[in-house]
Image (tube, grey):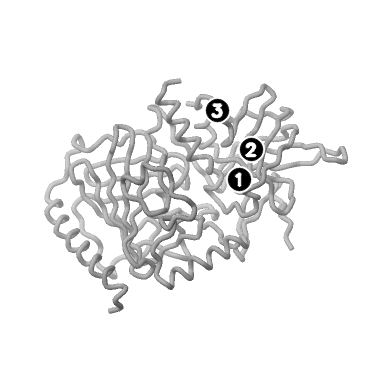
Amino acid sequence: MSVRFGLTLLLLAAVQSGAALAHHSTAMFEPERRITLNGTIKEFQWTNPHAWIQVSVLGADGKPADWSFECGSPNTLSRLGWKPSTLKPGDTIAIVANPMKDGTHAGLMYTIKLADGRMLGPGAASTEAPAR
Amino acid sequence: MNSARRPVMVGRMLAAALWIWAGTTAAQSLPRAADLPDWSGAWTRSTGAFYESTAEQALEPPPPADSPRRKPPYTPKFEAIYRDNLARIAADRFPDPISVCGTPAGWPRLLALPDAYEFVTRPEQTWVLTENGPNVMRIYTDGRSDPAPGDFWATYTGYNVGRWEKDTLVFRSLGLKGVGSTILARTGLVMSDKLETTTRIRLIAPDRLLVTTVLTDAEALTRPWPVAFTYSRLPPGSTVYDYACAENNRNPITSDGRTLTLDSGGRVIDKIE
């Protein structure tokens, strides 16, 4: 990766960390609190205006529950190294997100750790090379 | 005349006179396409937001959250509107107009969007295209004049008439929609439909564009309010994508301004009292 590419990615990561703010109020999320959940990918919606990650998470009662995690737009994500194939149904992940204030099973994605150890998301320290 | 508003009025009259004089001298010759600066490719915002900034400050870190630069010099009427907006934000009743897919961000808010930008220059016209939205802004440099009062109506991106001053595009924007239709930022900042802006765009490095815009608003502001943004050119060959907001909008707005969240099946998942 060239220095220029790297600088561009850093700029993107800095500015786009608020990318999910682009389309609607985020008053439903807790801005100061983050939760970490382990689960299995059910669906990855690579769609505008936001990509969404549907995750099955085992609850305290041992039963699986569906969670929805909102991301930036595919356009933003693609420039930060994401692809439509980055997440597949059945993948095990650990996700960090700002939860919804009302306790609903949803949140604003901050980082996601893939099964191979890669970290992605606006809160990740590094990103993959951009898809071109 | 209210003494508090006299500086605004005098400033606007002087700015308009200078604008007309400069425009009549510049309108006589269009630049050649080959003489226009190279703004090709895709760009992304790298610094700036809606807080008061000089061109130099645009390159500095953002001002602290409690900085007076964060808030425009509002008139009492718009100070009250702003404070009401803050209360509405706290209650999740300050919906973003662009959450209704198809509603443009408008000018000058489109300066502060995520995703890619394109600045397409032609001698007679420049287009600012934003991937997010998308938004299309047309800036006419073909020698035309501003429309006469009564000959135009408010639109999201307004009427933008300008000229090239060597490597700098200078243009004036008027006929803009205001509070009730557009916002400047989701922090509660709004302007009135009296808003007019004067904007300068130029390269400050081969891959860095500086945009400075001075907002004047006889109804909302007690003095002109300058803001500045910079944009960095994305790697050569970067693709600018579709942005179809209605493709999978899982955040509809209620009639009272609350933003909802839908599950993957389209059902509201918020706990609504």
The amino acid pointed to by label 1 is Asn
Which image quadrant is residue A11 in?
top left
Residue density around tag 3, few if under 14, some if 14–19, many if 20 or more, within 10 Å: some
Dot 1: what SS? loop
Dot 3: what SS? loop
Q: Which mark's residue is nearer the viewer, 3 or 1?
A: 3
Which image quadrant is residue A85 in?
top right
Label 1 chain ID? B
Instruction: Using the numbered discs, state the Cα–Cα distance from disc 3 to disc 1 in whole angstroms.
Output: 28 Å
What residue would you read off at disc 2? A45
Q: In this view, does B86 lie above or below B204?
A: below
Instruction: Using the numbered discs, state the Cα–Cα distance from disc 1 to disc 2 in whole angstroms.
Output: 9 Å
- Answer yes or no: do the residues labelled 1 and 2 have beta carbons within 8 Å? yes
Q: Is residue A39 left or right of residue B132?
A: right
x and y, in percent, of residue B153 in the image:
35, 65
What residue would you read off at disc 3? A126
* Residue at (33, 33) in percent of width and height: B207
Q: Which mark's residue is nearer the viewer, 3 or 2?
A: 3
Label 3 chain ID? A
Same chain for marks 3 and 2? yes
Q: Is residue B35 left or right of residue A51?
A: left
Label 2 chain ID? A
Dot 2: what SS? strand
Q: In this view, does B189 lie above or below B33?
A: below
- Answer yes or no: do the residues labelled 3 and 1 have beta carbons within 8 Å? no
Which image quadrant is residue A127 in?
top right
Q: Residue furthest bottom?
A: B1
Which numbered disc flags the more N-terminal residue, 3 or 2? Answer: 2
